[in-house]
C-alpha cells in the first residue's frame, strides 16, 4: 500500500516534467537523489522552483544550504533530540579506537549535522578535531574535511579509525589551532584552498578536565586531573576568561577561510552551579562569539545522550543534575 499522501500524488500528477521546463539545467547542481531520478522529476509552484518525485519527496531549487527534502528539513529543526549510539560493534564506528579521547563525538551525530549544514563535496573544518568525529561524519555523507588538534595521539587514532571503517582519511595538522589558522600557507595546504562551508567544533570546556576532581565528579573520573594535553595553548588548561577569549579568537580566524553564509557549530556543556555562580557556560560562549563581526547566533539544538551513565550525585543530601545533554550552538557568517 502506498504511503504517499493524496495531496502529493495530485501535485505530482498535475506538474510538468523537470526536463521539459529546464532542458539545459546543470544537473550536477542537484542533489544526487534528484539526479538519480531526474527522468521522473517534476516541478511545481508559480515560479516552478519546487521539485517533486513520484514517491512524494520534494526539493527546492533555491536551497543553497543542503540537499535535504522538505520533510527532512522540518524534522531536523526540532530543537531537542535524544540518541543512544552504541559503543560496541559495527554501529559504534570504531569506538574502541576513538575512546582514548575523554569525550569522542559519535560520527553518526556529526554526519547528521553536516548533512543539514552543507551540500555534497563542500568542506567541513574542525579546529579541535580530537579523534575525528567530525571528519568521520563528513566522510559518511560525501563531504570533504580537514582538522587541527594539539594531540598527535588523537589524530593517529582518527586515522586508524577511518582506515578500519574504510573511509577516506582527511588531512590534519597537529598544532595550536590559532597559530595554524594564522598561517595562510598551512591553511591552503590543509583545505586545498577550498572555502570552509561548516566549522564544526567541540572545544574543551575551559579547565574543567585539568582540575583535580572533587565531589560528585570522582564517580566518573576518580580524584585526579584528566587534561586533554599538558600544553599551555590547550583551551582545556585555561581559566574561563582566557578560554572564552581564545575560543573567540580561533573562531574569528576560521571566518577568514569561510565562505559567506557558512555556519559555525559549537558543542558546549554547562558546568555545575557553585553557590551563587550559575555556570551557564553556553550562554557565555554565545555572548563571546557574538562579539565577532559578521558572525550571528542563530539558535541551538539540545542533544540528550541517552547512552551516558547515570550517577547518584548529591545523594542523599541535595539535588545535583546528571547532565546528559549538551548544547549545539549555531552561528552563521553573514555577508555584512
Image: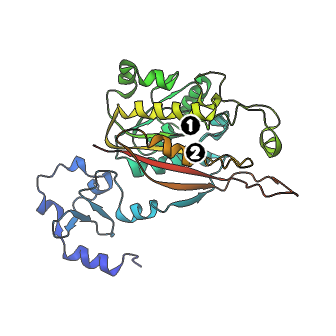
Say which residue label 2 marks: 268
Mark nearer the N terminus (2 vs 1): 1
Residue 325, percent from left and from top: 63, 53
> Can you see residue 148?
yes
Near mark 2 (Cα within 10 A), the count class, few <14, some 14-19 or many ≥20, is many
Left or right, 299 with respect to 93, comes to: left
On-image quarter of the N terminus = bottom left
Q: Verify CB contact (< 8 Å) between mark 2 and mark 1.
A: yes
On-image quarter of the C terminus = top left
Query: In the image, is residue 29 above or below residue 258?
Result: below
Give the camera-side residue of 123 and 247.
247
Residue 233, percent from left and from top: 58, 23
Give the camera-side residue of 89 and 227.
227
Q: Which mark is residue 77?
A: none
Say which residue label 1 marks: 203
Q: Residue furthest right?
A: 316
Left or right, 329 with respect to 45, comes to: right
**Occupied quadrant, residue 281:** top right
**Occupied quadrant, residue 5:** bottom left
Left or right, 33 with respect to 109, comes to: left
Residue 110, percent from left and from top: 51, 46
Q: Residue furthest front?
A: 276
Query: In the image, is residue 59 above or below residue 307?
Result: below
> Can you see residue 40?
no
Of helix, strand and loop, which one carries label 1? Answer: loop
In the rendered picture of this protein, how many numbered marks are placed on residues?
Answer: 2
Give the camera-side residue of 322 and 109.
322
| Residue at x-position 30% and y-position 75% | 8
Left or right, 2 with respect to 31, comes to: right
| CA distance separating discs 2 and 1 | 8 Å
Amino acid at each position: 500500500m502506498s504511503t504517499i499522501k493524496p495531496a502529493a500524488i495530485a501535485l505530482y500528477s498535475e506538474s510538468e516534467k523537470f526536463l521539459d521546463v529546464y532542458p539545459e539545467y546543470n544537473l550536477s547542481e542537484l542533489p544526487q537523489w534528484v539526479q538519480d531520478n531526474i527522468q521522473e522529476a517534476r516541478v511545481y509552484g508559480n515560479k516552478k522552483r519546487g521539485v517533486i518525485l513520484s514517491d512524494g519527496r520534494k526539493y527546492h531549487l533555491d536551497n543553497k544550504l543542503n540537499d535535504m527534502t522538505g520533510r527532512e528539513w522540518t524534522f531536523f529543526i526540532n530543537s531537542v533530540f535524544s540518541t543512544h549510539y552504541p559503543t560496541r560493534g559495527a554501529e559504534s564506528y570504531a569506538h574502541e579506537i576513538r575512546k582514548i579521547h575523554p569525550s569522542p563525538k559519535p560520527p553518526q551525530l556529526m554526519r547528521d549535522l553536516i548533512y543539514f549544514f552543507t551540500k555534497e563535496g563542500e568542506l567541513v573544518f574542525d579546529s579541535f578535531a580530537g579523534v575525528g568525529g567530525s571528519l568521520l561524519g563528513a566522510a559518511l555523507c560525501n563531504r570533504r574535511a580537514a582538522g587541527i588538534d594539539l594531540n598527535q595521539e588523537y589524530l593517529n587514532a582518527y586515522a586508524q579509525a577511518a582506515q578500519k571503517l574504510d573511509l577516506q582519511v582527511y588531512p590534519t595538522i597537529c598544532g595550536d589551532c590559532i597559530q595554524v589558522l594564522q598561517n595562510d600557507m598551512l591553511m591552503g595546504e590543509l583545505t586545498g584552498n577550498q572555502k570552509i562551508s561548516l566549522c564544526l567544533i567541540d572545544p574543551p570546556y575551559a579547565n574543567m578536565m585539568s582540575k583535580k576532581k572533587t565531589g560528585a565528579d570522582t564517580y566518573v573520573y576518580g580524584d585526579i586531573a584528566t587534561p586533554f594535553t599538558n600544553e599551555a595553548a590547550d583551551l582545556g588548561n585555561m581559566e574561563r576568561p582566557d578560554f572564552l577569549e581564545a575560543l573567540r579568537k580561533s573562531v574569528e580566524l576560521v571566518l577568514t577561510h569561510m565562505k559567506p553564509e557558512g555556519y559555525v557549530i559549537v558543542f558546549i556543556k554547562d558546568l555545575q552551579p557553585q553557590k551563587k555562580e550559575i555556570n551557564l557556560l553556553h550562554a557565555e560562549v554565545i555572548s563571546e562569539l557574538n562579539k565577532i563581526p559578521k558572525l550571528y547566533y542563530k539558535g541551538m539544538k539540545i542533544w540528550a545522550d541517552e547512552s551516558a551513565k547515570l550517577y547518584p550525585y548529591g545523594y542523599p543530601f541535595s539535588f545535583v543534575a546528571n547532565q546528559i545533554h549538551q548544547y549545539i550552538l549555531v552561528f552563521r557568517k553573514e555577508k555584512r
